[in-house]
Image (cartoon, rainbow, N blue to C red):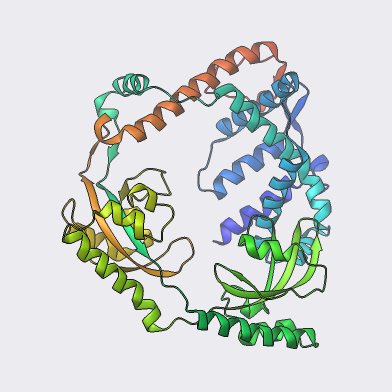
Amino acid sequence: MQKNKLIFLFLIVVSLSFGQKKVIDKVIGIVGKYPILLSDLQNSMLEREKQETALDKCKAFEMLVFQKLLVAQADRDSVTVTDAEVDHELDQRMTYYIQQFGSVEKLEEFYGKRTNVIKDELRSDIQEQLIAQKMQGKITGDVKLTPAEVRQFYNSIPVDSLPLINSEVELQQIVKRPTFSAEAKLAAKEQLEEYRARVVKGEKMSTLARLYSEDPGSAAKGGYYQFGRGVMDPAFEAVAFRLKQGEVSNVFETAYGYHFIELQARKGEMVEVKHILIVPKMSNSDFYLSKQLLDSIYTNIKEGKITFEEAAKKYSDDDDTKQNGGLMINRATASTKFENEDLSQTDPNLVVTLNSMQIGEISKPMQYTNPVDGKPGFRLLKLKNRIDPHRTNLKDDYQKLALLANADYNKKQVKDWIKKRSKITYIKLDPEYSCAFENQWTISN
């Protein structure tokens, strides 16, 4: 953990160009009019190491040469990105950096610079990266290979080289989430109105937040958060970005409960706030009512009064699956198939339950925690299919093979493009850093 923190800190020191590049850097390559600096190479390798996908020096250098070639070609093709696109990426990066350091003040103290200066120094690098991404998208295009092309790709792979696939299952679900009673909601709002009135009269927001807020992420810090756009609940952000410094919002509702906010500061597209959250109290009867509803649905399905798919569409509270007969999507792979490891990350007991079920069997109502918002609920599960461990094949793994085939096609497109464009683009590399690249480059003497 400490090693990763040191890598992260060094990475930012290099990537933010804090006045030291001219001393420690040198140019190790030029593509068109674009130089490649030694610190660019160090930055790239450290970033991959931090992400635990380490690259050797040769591969990292080739990726940088490729990025510069993309940017040089973007000049010719008038490929650009808007200021809004750059600003959005900058805000996301700055939010990440601030979270790593703990606060805006700590980030600024570490570098001795204001966040707006840091953003200015990052802007050109981020703009170049976004342009390169857009240019690469033009090269590969939005290609979707035909089934015949996917089959041809599959047939080109030697049998003993086909990937091994672990046991997988396909699942359907019907979800019922407990709802708060009108009385519970009113009580939460009235409690917050009382706290808000005390803040308006002069009591410290931080003191009340520590005493009464039910947000585990901020209560101990006096309700404090700092964030950019696209990070928090949309309703929470909408209120925060409308406030003036020192202003206290009215009580409002989000998916997490009821809040009010005091804006501490706004720096560009970053805000610092303090807030108090009160979650409406759910009684046992409210909670188990959802289980009783599922018990009734389960009975009707077993008695043949309604199919599982019809019940999912009519009764399920899960918007992501109800229109598709309850069929669940693996967020990690965007497919309908789950390995045991995928399931155990969200619910360790689920694997045990499924192991005892037959294909087509429906579970009785099971309590679970929604992986998106962390809220409890109940659900029925139907084991739609179970696929035993096997080597990749077209029948069971077409979607995986289609992704592999598209990636292979895109890689070939890039290889051909590099071969052609490097012949007509000036590329000069420092011999000390030259090596055997994967692609066929034409390098100037």
Q: Nearer the viewer, residue 71 or 53?
A: 71
User: What is the number of callouts on the image?
Assistant: 0
Q: Is residue 310 above or below residue 203?
A: above
Residue 49 percent location from the top left of the image: 55, 46
Residue 84 percent location from the top left of the image: 75, 42
Quadrant where the image shows the N terminus: bottom right
Residue 312 image-quadrant placement: bottom left
Residue 95 percent location from the top left of the image: 68, 57
Q: Nearer the viewer, residue 83 or 319?
A: 319
Quadrant where the image shows the C terminus: top right
Residue 427 percent location from the top left of the image: 70, 18
- The residue at the point 53 percent across, 26 percent down is 142
Residue 24 image-quadrant placement: top right
Q: Residue 365: in sight, yes or no?
A: no
234 left or right of 357 in image: right
Q: Nearer the viewer, residue 143 or 197?
A: 197
Q: Nearer the viewer, residue 49 or 87?
A: 87
- The residue at the point 31 percent across, 70 percent down is 293
- The residue at the point 60 percent across, 75 percent down is 258
Q: Residue 407: in sight, yes or no?
A: yes
- The residue at the point 69 percent across, 46 percent down is 89
Q: Is residue 139 above or below residue 333?
A: above
Q: Residue furthest front?
A: 305
